[in-house]
Amino acid sequence: MAEIHERETDYSEWIQSVSHRYRRSQIKAAVAVNAEMLKFYFNLGRDIVRMEADQAWGSGFLKRLSVDLKTKIPGASCFSPRNLYYMRC
């Protein structure tokens, strides 16, 4: 009987260990994704500054860019004119 209890304890500990490793992997993946997205936004901001330099004042460049990016990447909700403005700062 003690052997069955010991197996159950080992199994429970193993399940707990798998659960913790899974959660740690999820956190590491989220951190990696966030870091990559920050790089993307930084580079996009740099590109916007370059592109904006060629545009006439008041041309509505950010509004147009917002519409174009939302059309090209429909699932992304981060391309509002305000977000694009903040990316360029």
Image (cartoon, rainbow, N blue to C red):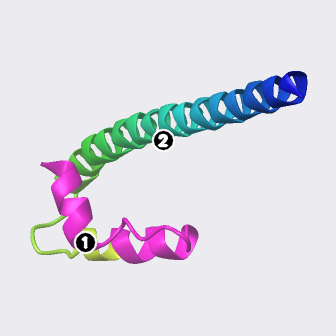
| Residue 83 image offset from top left, x and y in percent | 24, 64
Quarter in which the N terminus is drawn: top right
20 within the magenta span: no
Residue type indicated by callout 2? Ala
74 within the magenta span: yes
Q: Say which residue label 1 marks.
A: 81
Q: Residue at x 81, y 30 (%)?
A: 5
Badge 1 element? helix
Q: Residue at x 19, y 50 (%)?
A: 88
Q: Quadrant of residue 35?
A: top left
Is 74 placed left or right of 58 in the picture? right
Q: Earlier in the sequence, mark 2 or mark 1?
A: 2
**41 or 17, which lies in front?**
17
Q: Quadrant of residue 13?
A: top right
Mark linked to residue 30: 2
| Residue 31 image offset from top left, x and y in percent | 43, 35
Is 74 placed left or right of 17 in the picture? left
| Residue 20 image offset from top left, x and y in percent | 57, 33
Q: Are marks 2 and 1 in contact (CB under 8 Å)?
A: no
The span picked out in magenta is: 65-89
Q: Residue at x 29, y 40 (%)?
A: 42
**77 or 73, which lies in front?**
77
**16 or 25, which lies in front?**
16
Nearer to us: label 2 or label 1 = 2
The count of marks equals 2
- 58 above or below 22? below
Badge 2 element? helix
